[in-house]
Image: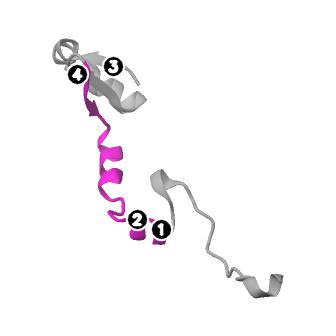
Amino acid sequence: MKTWQVQEAKARFSELLRVTVEDGPQIVSHGRPTAVVVPMEQWQRLQQRPRSLKALLQAPDGPDGVILPRRGRLRRHDPEALD
């Protein structure tokens, strides 16, 4: 991920957009990292993410498309049986 100074990003805005689409998110800095330019497709995916931990855990896939294993039927161990 490249960092662009604000002046450079303004002067080369078309290139910033092209690089963002081709290579992914780009950081824009104004003395320190200030903003990130992301491709529209990635932004739309981020907007559709579950908003709560419960929704995330119940979703069929995890964050950023990471597939989580299906829930199985776990056997609970009886702590008294260990005595």
Residue 39 shown left or right of residue 79 in the figure: left
Specify the label residue 3 is tagged with.
3
Instruction: Please name the residue that numbered disc 4 is placed on.
Output: 14
* Along the viewing direction, whichever of 41 and 63 lies nearer the viewer: 63
- Image disc number at residue 53: 2
**C-alpha distance separating marks 2 and 3:** 31 Å
Rendered view: 78 above or below 16: below
- Nearer the observer: mark 3 or 4; the answer is 3
Residue mark closest to the camera, 2 vs 4 = 2
Secondary-structure class at tag 3 = strand
Magenta-highlighted residues: 32-59
Q: Quadrant of residue 20?
A: top left
Q: Mark 2 or mark 3: which is in front?
A: 2
Amino acid at the residue labelled 3: Thr
Q: Is residue 78 above or below residue 64?
A: below
Q: Is residue 75 magenta?
A: no
